Image (cartoon, rainbow, N blue to C red):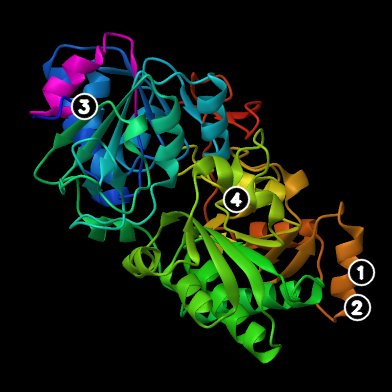
């Protein structure tokens, strides 16, 4: 007997879902810049004449450029996301979207879905492997992406859930990341995406001498903090300096015979190497950042998948970020109050978003920002950042190519670093050095320009607004 969940195509599944004008649809971003599902689904929605959709995507990338025309035509009227870059971000910055976009943190997105603040009518989940009943996983199939952590809240709380797969297998699919009890319909397509697009962005440690010096300084700060002992926990991003810190930390842990408890976040091959070297007992993975991490997630039982809610939801019974000892953060800008911007450029153009930045900074015992003083002619340390992504009260240390500054709120840390012989400078002094070297002055949007995006903190409070770029 045919399975009633299995639909002949996306249009049939959309019709069966009951989606109407003004509805909300959601997507996850585990295939990152290789994703094809969001574009396919939105093209079908447009073709059905459905309009004024709220797009609740966990992240948006350059590959989603076709959505700009759907914004222009009024098919998409609002966007909720934790990160956006590329043409969609530019369109939002220039005021094309009818209503201000809402930019969450990863934990804040999960919180808003689970609390009912963000109500999803139909969740479309890109499933690298699924069966006709909707059991799915991300570790098998030609489009394997690893964990499906950002899709879990959507699957559990959306009114209707559609699994979209290019690897339909006999029942039951095994292992199961999201179960059939959360899935209404299944659609088989030719391709859900290109897993090589997972590698979008920098996923290699920097080899630049200045970047390596910053990484060495950050590693010295970790060593001097008193946190680098057995049971140590750690998270870093996928930027070049952050990965260089991971590489140098690996050597330091081996020399000191330190075994950490876990590393977490989006996982890269560098962190997998540390797991396999016995430097961490476990990995908590919400998203694989490269194909080595995908393979590790498939075969290593100590490489654990986690949902975005388990990762960083501040209103659940416990978030992994709250168990972090050290977090390495990047910055587009940082100001005299240690506020960090990773949402916009200094010109106000949207080019990113918090993702887990603000979540991990809030949870970690030691949140370290690494950055050069200047980039592209701009001073990266400013009097006030263009857009506050992560509040300065949750940032502990700034490490630059010209020295280390400690947040005055952390007098205890200041004394530890000074005792370890680390040369410290005030952030005002670093700001002056950055300004003296700057060759370009940022042209920020007018304070009277229309608001095009709302930047939310993880608890849903308003952190800042983004204004339209001329």
Task: Provide the residue designation for mark 1.
Answer: 415
Q: Which SS class for mark 4?
A: strand
* Magenta-drawn segment: 5-26
| Mark 3 crowd level (few <14, some 14–19, many ≥20, 10 Å Cα) | many
Task: Provide the residue designation for mark 4.
Answer: 333
Q: Is residue 430 above or below residue 216?
A: above
| Mark 4 crowd level (few <14, some 14–19, many ≥20, 10 Å Cα) | many
Foreground: disc 3 or disc 4: 3
Task: Give the Cα separation between the discs numbered 2 and 4.
Answer: 29 Å
Foreground: disc 3 or disc 1: 3
Name which of mark 3 and mark 1 comes first in the sequence: 3
**Residue 454 visible (yes or no):** no
Which part of the image, by quadrant, shows the N terminus?
A: top left
Task: Provide the residue designation for mark 2.
Answer: 419
Q: Name the residue at 65% across, 83% down.
A: 253
Q: Is residue 193 above or below residue 277?
A: above
Side of 387 relative to 267 (left or right): right
Task: Give the Cα separation between the discs numbered 3 and 1.
Answer: 55 Å
Task: Give the Cα separation between the discs numbered 3 and 4.
Answer: 34 Å
Task: Provide the residue designation for mark 3.
Answer: 42
Q: Which mark is residue 251?
A: none
> Horizontal and vertical percent for residue 324?
68, 58
Q: Name the residue at 21% across, 27% down.
A: 42
Q: Quadrant of residue 428?
A: bottom right
């Amino acid at each position: 007997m045919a399975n009633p969940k299995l639909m002949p195509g996306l249009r049939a599944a959309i019709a069966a879902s009951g989606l109407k004008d003004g509805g909300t649809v959601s997507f996850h971003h585990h295939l990152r810049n290789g994703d094809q599902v969001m574009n396919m689904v939105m093209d079908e929605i447009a073709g059905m004449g459905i309009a004024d959709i709220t797009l609740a995507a966990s992240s948006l990338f350059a590959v989603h450029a076709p959505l700009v025309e759907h914004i222009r035509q009024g098919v998409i009227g609002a966007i909720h996301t934790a990160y956006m870059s590329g043409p969609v971000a530019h369109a939002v910055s220039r005021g094309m979207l009818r209503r201000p976009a809402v930019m969450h943190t990863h934990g804040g997105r999960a919180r808003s879905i689970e609390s009912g603040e963000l109500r999803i009518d139909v969740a479309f989940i890109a499933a690298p492997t699924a069966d006709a009943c909707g059991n799915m996983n991300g570790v098998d199939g030609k489009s394997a992406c690893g964990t499906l952590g950002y899709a879990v809240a959507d699957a559990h709380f959306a009114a209707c859930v559609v699994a979209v797969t290019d690897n339909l297998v006999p029942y039951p699919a095994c292992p199961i990341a999201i179960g059939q009890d959360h899935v209404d319909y299944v659609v088989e397509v030719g391709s859900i995406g290109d897993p090589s697009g997972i590698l979008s962005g920098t996923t290699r440690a920097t080899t630049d001498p200045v970047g390596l010096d910053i990484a060495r300084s950050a590693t010295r700060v970790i060593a001097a903090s008193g946190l680098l002992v057995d049971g140590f926990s750690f998270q870093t991003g996928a930027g070049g300096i952050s990965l260089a810190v991971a590489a140098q930390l690996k050597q330091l842990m081996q020399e000191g015979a330190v075994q950490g408890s876990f590393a977490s976040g989006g996982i890269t091959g560098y962190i997998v190497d540390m797991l396999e070297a016995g430097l961490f007992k476990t990995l908590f993975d919400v998203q694989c950042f490269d194909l080595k991490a995908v393979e590790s997630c498939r075969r290593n039982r100590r490489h654990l998948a986690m949902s975005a809610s388990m990762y960083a939801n501040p209103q659940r019974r416990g978030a992994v970020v709250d168990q972090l000892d050290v977090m390495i953060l990047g910055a587009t800008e940082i100001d005299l109050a240690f506020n960090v911007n990773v949402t916009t450029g200094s010109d106000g153009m949207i080019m990113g978003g918090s993702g887990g930045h603000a979540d991990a900074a809030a949870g970690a015992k030691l949140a370290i920002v690494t950055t050069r003083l200047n980039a592209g002619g701009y001073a990266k340390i400013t009097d006030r950042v263009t857009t506050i992504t992560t509040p300065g009260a949750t940032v502990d240390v700034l490490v630059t190519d010209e020295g280390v500054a400690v947040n005055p709120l952390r007098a205890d840390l200041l004394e530890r670093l000074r005792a370890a012989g680390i040369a410290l400078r005030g952030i005002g002094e670093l700001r002056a050095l950055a300004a003296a070297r700057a060759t370009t002055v940022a042209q920020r949007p007018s304070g009277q320009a229309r608001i095009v995006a709302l930047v939310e903190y993880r608890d849903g409070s308003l952190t800042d607004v983004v204004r339209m770029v001329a």
